[in-house]
Image (cartoon, rainbow, N blue to C red):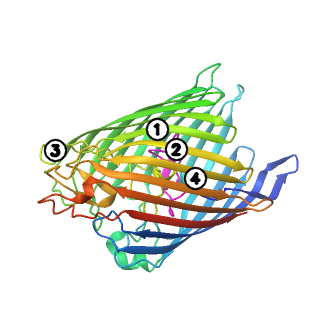
Amino acid sequence: MSSSVLFLSSSVFAQDNDDPSLGWSLHLDVRLRTEYLSDSFRIVAPAKDHLQFSRTVVGALYRASDWSVEVEVQDSRAWGAEALSPIGTDDINTLEPIVAKLSKQWALKDGSEFDLSLGRMTIDYGSRRLLARNKFRNTSNAFQGAHLSYVSPSANAAVFYTLPLQRRPDGLDFDSLREKEFRLDKAGSGERFWGASIDYVVPQSDATLASYMFVSELNDEPGRPVADRELTTLGARFVWTDGALDAELEAAYQWGESRASVFSTPDEVLDHRAWFTHMHLGMELWPGLNLRLAYDQATGDRDPFDGRNERFDRLYGARAFELGPSGIFGAAVRSNLRAPAVRAWWQSSENQAWLLSHRWLSLDSPRDFFVTGGRRDFTGASGRKIGGQWELRWRWTPNNTSLVVALGAAYLNKGEYFAGAPGALLNPAASTDSQYLFTQIGWSY
């Protein structure tokens, strides 16, 4: 369940009275959220954190018979951060044109269609676990390049080549970031992302088979040190529904070369071999109430000194819809993770919905980083168990309005990992459980 506001558009001018989809349309999306976190699981964090966030998206689309032009500007801001708050470019990115593209469509006689887009764009693919336009997060992944898609009744396919936008100012200029200074994001040659996908609808069934390949290249640029990588990710997904039951299985294998950190030298290149998987089974217990059992695993680096890296790179995916709130919380991420879960979703009325979930979080490799906590015990003596994560969300859409109101809470019952271990300097003891709350209101036109 996503707590983002609904995305609506309003026709402003019509080019052809017989086809209202042609011509100009405008949309506006405004969201305000406040977040509170106490007793963080991070190695460096304030005892209590209370921030306010805003996100405004203004967009315009002009559509002719077989081509279109689209522009979207997103303004993301945050206030109230303590000195050690974990804010960054995930939270702040002022007045950024995340979409500025020209598209051309070709309709075929069999009802299928090709669509070519050039320019700046956001991309959602499949489950959104590895490539997504972010919804809960205050800023969005955006790319500059070309995207060609094919849509037919039985299959969808796409190929793309892009330069991911590097959000500016970044964490290396933290004062400018906190002051919410405007700088246009940069598409640098040091970061490239390209790939292809195909989704096939199984005839006479409610099942879809999909496969994809993504290639990610990241290299240092002047003033921007990064952990270099050249990774290929090959994955497949199966989605099935049958009445009150639904199931999904997704798995991806990742290989190439990577460096352990931004401080690694050019000679310290690691052989990269990693994988992740997601599986779930859902059942509708009665109309409006769905129960889901799920399991997620993403590998971690087994041995920090063996010249290999088994830590799965999560690429440009989203996580809040499945692994719990991100923002200043975000305990779970698809990297060095094992996470069985049980989740209940309840549509209590036409305009209200509830989510309750529990995840058992642990490290796939106890010698690798607890990624979002910035913690690591090289010996593995601290164990695997991060703890139990509870999540509760409520969403309300008042009748006859464009408002969406959401409330949410998360609780991390810290496990044995946070007791620390002798000699684990990067994993000091932190036994008090983490508590997180958010309130949110959004309006769209």
Q: CA distance from mark 3 to mark 1?
A: 28 Å
Q: Which span is picked out in magenta?
A: 123-146
The tag on residue 338 is none
Q: Residues within 10 Å of mark 2 (few under 14, many from 20)?
A: some
In the displayed image of the protein, which residue is found farthest to the right? Answer: 17
Give the x, y percent position of residue 172. 32, 71
Give the x, y percent position of residue 316. 43, 50
Determine whether, in the image, residue 417 is placed left or right of residue 24: left
Is disc 3 placed on a helix, strand or loop?
loop
Determine whether, in the image, residue 342 is placed left or right of residue 191: right
Residue type, label 1: Ala
Question: Closer to the camera: disc 3 or disc 2?
Answer: 2
Upstream in sequence: badge 2 or badge 4: 4
Q: State the residue at coordinates (37%, 79%).
A: 175
Is disc 1 placed on a helix, strand or loop?
strand
Q: State the residue at coordinates (64%, 41%).
A: 289
Q: Which residue is mark 3?
A: 303
The tag on residue 343 is 2
Residue 27 seen anywhere in this rendered image of the structure: yes
Question: Closer to the camera: disc 3 or disc 1?
Answer: 1
Q: Which residue is mark 4?
A: 2
Question: What type of secondary structure mainly makes up the magenta span?
Answer: loop
Above or below, comparing residue 160 to residue 101 in the picture = above
Is disc 2 placed on a helix, strand or loop?
strand
Give the x, y percent position of residue 169. 40, 71
Q: CA distance from mark 3 to mark 2?
A: 33 Å
Q: Are marks 2 and 1 in contact (CB under 8 Å)?
A: yes
Q: Which residue is mark 1?
A: 294
